[in-house]
Every structure is written in C-alpha cells, then in structure tokens.
Amino acid sequence: MEKNFRGDATIADVAQHANVSISTVSRVINGLNRVHPQTRQRVMEAVEVLHYQPSAYARGLAMQRTRTLGFIISSISDPFYVEIVRGVEEAAASEQYNLLIASQPFNMESQRYLELFTQKRVDGMVLVGIKTRKEVLEHLQTRGFPVALVQQEGTENVATFLTDNYGGARRLTEHLLRLGYRHLAYIAGSNDTPDNLERFKGFRDALDHAGLAFNPNHFAQGDYYRGSGYRAMEELLERHPLPEAVFAANDQMALDAILVLRTRGIRVPDDLAVVGFDDIPMASYALPPLTTVRQPAYELGFKAAKEVLGALRERRTPQRVVLPTQLIVRASCGDRSA
Amino acid sequence: MEKNFRGDATIADVAQHANVSISTVSRVINGLNRVHPQTRQRVMEAVEVLHYQPSAYARGLAMQRTRTLGFIISSISDPFYVEIVRGVEEAAASEQYNLLIASQPFNMESQRYLELFTQKRVDGMVLVGIKTRKEVLEHLQTRGFPVALVQQEGTENVATFLTDNYGGARRLTEHLLRLGYRHLAYIAGSNDTPDNLERFKGFRDALDHAGLAFNPNHFAQGDYYRGSGYRAMEELLERHPLPEAVFAANDQMALDAILVLRTRGIRVPDDLAVVGFDDIPMASYALPPLTTVRQPAYELGFKAAKEVLGALRERRTPQRVVLPTQLIVRASCGDRSA
DNA sequence: CTGAAAGCGCTTACAG
DNA sequence: CTGAAAGCGCTTACAG
C-alpha cells in the first residue's frame, strides 16, 4: 500500500484498497451523488482500516475554501475576551465552520499572525483588539476575504462591532452622581484601543453636564491589566482631598482598587465607592460585589462571526454595529444619599 | 492580470508581471539559490504591487509540511493555562514555527478540533488536558505526527509532560501539619484529568504518615471552576466539627473559599486557614495572599513544544517528564503553633 | 542564473 | 453508478 512520506494514507491508498477510483472515494467521503451501497461499504472499510483522513490542504486547494474561520485576539488571558471567543465559536459551529485561533502577543510589531490567516489558511476572520493598518484591511476586503473587527475601529469598508462605551460610562457616572457622590476619580486603561477614551469621555460629559469640575489630581493611568489598578489606586490615595468614588476603566483594575482599599482598612463603599466596566465573571464574586457596566461580549463575537460567514455567501455592504451596554448595580457603589 | 476566483494574486500573476517563470518567483520568495539581482528586484516589485501572499495550502501540499504547530486546550479561560500557552508560543517562535490554537469546548464528545489538526493542517501538536483515545494517539505517533501531552496521561509511546502533583500536595499538607493544624478539609477538583486524584493522594498520605485520620465529612466536591469552590466551602461550613484548614485542589476554588469565609465574618487564617494549588496570578493578590503550590506552567508548555519540534527533526523515544513544583508560603495558612 | 515539467492530494465537470 | 483527466498554487529536481 502506497503511503506518502509521513506515512499517512492518501485518497489513492483508499481507492486502491477498495478497488475503485479516487473519484469514487471522494464521492463517498463527501456524501455527494449516488454511489452503489456495496461500493460505499468497501470504501468506508478502507477508510477505517487505513485511518484515512483527507488532507485539509489538498482539499482547500482544490475547493478554494477551507470552511474555517480565523480568529485573532490580542490577549488570550483577558476574562472579558473569553465570552467573545464563545460567541465566535458558536456562530462558526452553527454553519459547520471550524475555528482557528491565534493570539497576537502584546505589542507585537509584526503582522505575523495576521499573515498566517491571510495566506489562505482560512476563509475569513474576526479580529479583536488588533492594531491593523487600514490599507491592509481595505485590500483584504477587495480581495474577497471578509473581515470583521471587534472592539476596534477600522475603515468604512470593513464590518465593525463595538459596544456603547460612551453611553455605558456616562450612565454609570450619572448613577454615581444620583447616589450623591461629587468627587469622582478615574483610573484609565491603555489607549491601544479607543474604548478607554470613549469611557473617559462619557465619564467627563456626565460630570460636565451636572456642572461638576473634574479634579486632574483624581486621574491615574493604568493599562487594564491586573496590577496596574493596584498601583493606580495607591497613587490616588496619596492625593488630597481623597475622591469619594473611583471609576476604573475596567473590572480587573476595579478589583485591584478594592483590594488596595481593603488591605488598608478603608471600607468599600462606605469610605470610598468603586465601580468598574465589563462585568467579568469575577465582578459578582468580589467583596463587595462590583457595580459595573455589562458589555454583550458573547453577542459581539457571535454577530461578528455571522457577518463574516454571511459575506462569504453574498456580497454585503459592511456595517458598523454598536451594541448597547447595561448598567449592573451591585454593592460596591453604595448609596451616599441614603 | 490573471487572478484566481477570490481575487488574490497567485505566483503565476507575479511571474507574468515580472516577466519571469514561476520557478524564479519561488526562488526569490524563499531566498534560495542565486537569482540575478535585477531579476530579484523585478519580482519583489511585482509581489509588492500585487499584494502577493503565497498560499499556505499550496505550499504545504508541495512541501509536505506547514511550519505550524497545533495547540489544543480544553479551557481557554483558565488562568493557569495562559502561562502554558506562552511557553508553547515562545518555543514555536524560537524555531520560526507558527502556532494555531483550537479550544475544545468543555465536555465536547467529538474529536472535531483534534481532527482539524490531524488533517495535515499542522506538523505536530501539543494537547493540554484533552481526553484522547489511546489508539488515536498511538496511530498519530506511528504515522509520524508528533504529539506531546501536557497535564494528562497518554500512552507509553507519546511524550508526556506533567508536574509533581503528588509531591506538591504532600509537601503543602506537611507544611500545614507542621504549623499545628490537625483537622484538614479537602475541596476536590474534577476527575477529568488525573491531577485531582494525585493531589488528593498526596494530601491523604501526608495525613496517614502523621498518624492522623481523615474525616470523610471534611471532603467536598468541586470542579476546579470558579463558583464550585464557593458551594463546596458553604457545604463544609455545615459540618461539625469544622475543620481548621481547607486544602482546595486549585487556587480558583481556594479564592472562592476565602470569599465565603470573609463574607461570613470568619477570619482567614485565624479562624480557618485556606491553601490552594497552581499559584495563578491572582493568588498573590488575594486577601490574605494565598499559600499555594506553584506549577511550572511556562516551562511545561515550552518543553512540550520543544519536544514536538525535536521529533519533527529526528526520531526520538517519547519521554515522560515530571517537573517539580514549589511550595509558596503566604499569609492564608497562618501559623497555628505560633 | 533561469525555465519546463512533474508532483503534492484533493475536487469536479465530462464521458460513458 | 463509476472512471480518466484537468486543475487548484505551490516546490523542486532536472536541463540548459
């Protein structure tokens, strides 16, 4: 029995074993056309015996499509992203598409992982939080390689899925104001993606609208990651006067802030309120449970993947979708007016 | 200019544009053989103009290898796994290999994601915590498709990378005994992988060796995930007498346990000590910081990937590697003898 | 230094 | 219902 260099059986091996042509083997495997039951039976046996698995590469070459979606994510560890992955995964599975994930390491200059996919390894892809040059995106689009962006801005011609960061931050801030807080601090995330700026703008606009000034001393820079919220909170504690409430640009930093405060015996929310953004799973487990803004992460991933799959079927005009957020009130924001 | 159905340029387009044969284009792209500088120049320009990217599939078919490693992980969200991914990633990058990740959803019966890779999409793969039938593993091995398992048992013929769960758990337990604790409870993880049993055995043997009995009432079943530790700890609190210390089979559950205790005003470690396993990043941020056992996650991933890459080059006898763990003493275990 | 041609393992009209 | 043959986009001896 002929085998290729690596020892795996090819379609020719199966054909020979079953005493048919490779066309017939192909038909049996793909369940197309009619094949005589007995022939089918023989082929299936050969497949079994030889442990035959079709080569995705050969098949992809011949069919000019891979039935596989690519998904590139900047930080595989971010708990907020986990739900996005789930959404993309289920959308792909719903149309019998496979999903291949690549994680683009932080601050990676090269587009290596992007190229991995654009080299025709997948039919289209979803990018979340990956800096990509507009011209690259444009070119992929014209080339007929559909792309959807999540949580990042691209160009007009590329489908984009965002959440209403501005509105969410604004509503959360307004909630704090309604509770009676007047001196609010902000722990910022990194500006690699636009969401930090949008959240900060929502925060500022809510203050402005209420006729309140923002004390620049009540601003500390973080980077969204665990640890940066810790340092930021410590910085804020050195400022005078202390703020009454802290708005962290994401939950991870908010949880850090709570930890710092508790460690120092500062009560949350009685002495200082803390709120976050994202509603990651841990938010509800915190002590006290965290008031935050929920982003529809699963939906974001699901819709983005569906968009790519749709574009694979028919020509579409790429849209820009902004999904609403939801205010989740828990105990960490307290109630000053009570 | 000829283009294929999707509109992307092929090697033939580049050849035509540069007025050379496809052989020459191939040589320029792969930097092999000598090519006349001017010819090279013309080809490079054509590549630029046409945005040419070689098809990974065509190349893979022709070369019979992909320079890509596959990595399948059961839970992309587990913080302990993040470091493993990093290790695999860096090992791959060190030999100019790409990495493709697939996450096998929990309890997924089918081997869909495994097949994704064995269909010659990658040259070899690293599996972490994926249930795989022995015969499948054996067959891949004989077929010349190297596989390395991480944190899971396979067969003799497949490289396996584990950590010393037994020793780590035993040493941690001995530490608790040395601190004066006598009544220890255990919160178990799921038994999908062998590590829970090994840890429990280390725990039990330490007790036995000290001549202490284990109270079956002091056992609660969790599943390693966030939330299960919460319920398990609540269960334990209903038992009489209460234990003096709780050994959770991983950090996530230990952090849950601490949360339950703090919520109820039970002091950790003064009233009840808590320890975990893994040393995830959050462990040191907990209140109090968690005493635990560090697993060399990065090293685990790095070594496993290196093994696969090595097996791609030369024949190797698969080894079984058990990496040592390290006891990390922090505040959550207190000191009863002090 | 360069090109024509075979081959990688599939799918898919086209005949029969 | 089945097979021979072309073609997918590359690489790689083999000639020259």
Image: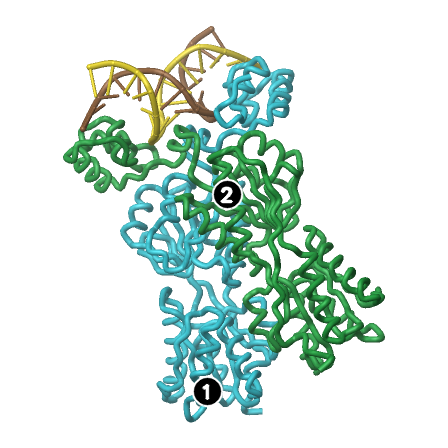
Chain colours: A green, B cyan, C yellow, D brown
Amino acid type at mark 2 = Gly
Residue A209, placed above or below residue A28: below
Left or right of A224 on screen, residue A91: left
Residue tagged 2: A70
Nearer-the-camera pick, A28 or B300: A28
In the displayed image of the protein, which residue is found farthest to the bottom? Answer: B241
The kind of secondary structure element at disc 2 is strand
Where's residue B170, x and y in %?
Answer: 43, 77
Q: Which amino acid type is marked by label 1? A: Leu
Q: Can residue B21 be seen in this view?
A: yes
* Among the 4 quarters of the image, the one containing residue B53: top right
**Mark identifier at residue A118:** none
Q: Which residue is drawn at 43% across and 57% down?
A: B74
Q: In this view, does D14 lie above or below A200?
A: above
Q: How far apart are marks 2 and 1 (CA)?
A: 47 Å
Q: Residues within 10 Å of mark 1 (few under 14, many from 20)?
A: some
Residue highlighted by disc 1: B237
Q: Residue at x 50, y 62 (%)?
A: B78
* Residue A250 point in image, percent of width and height: 66, 63
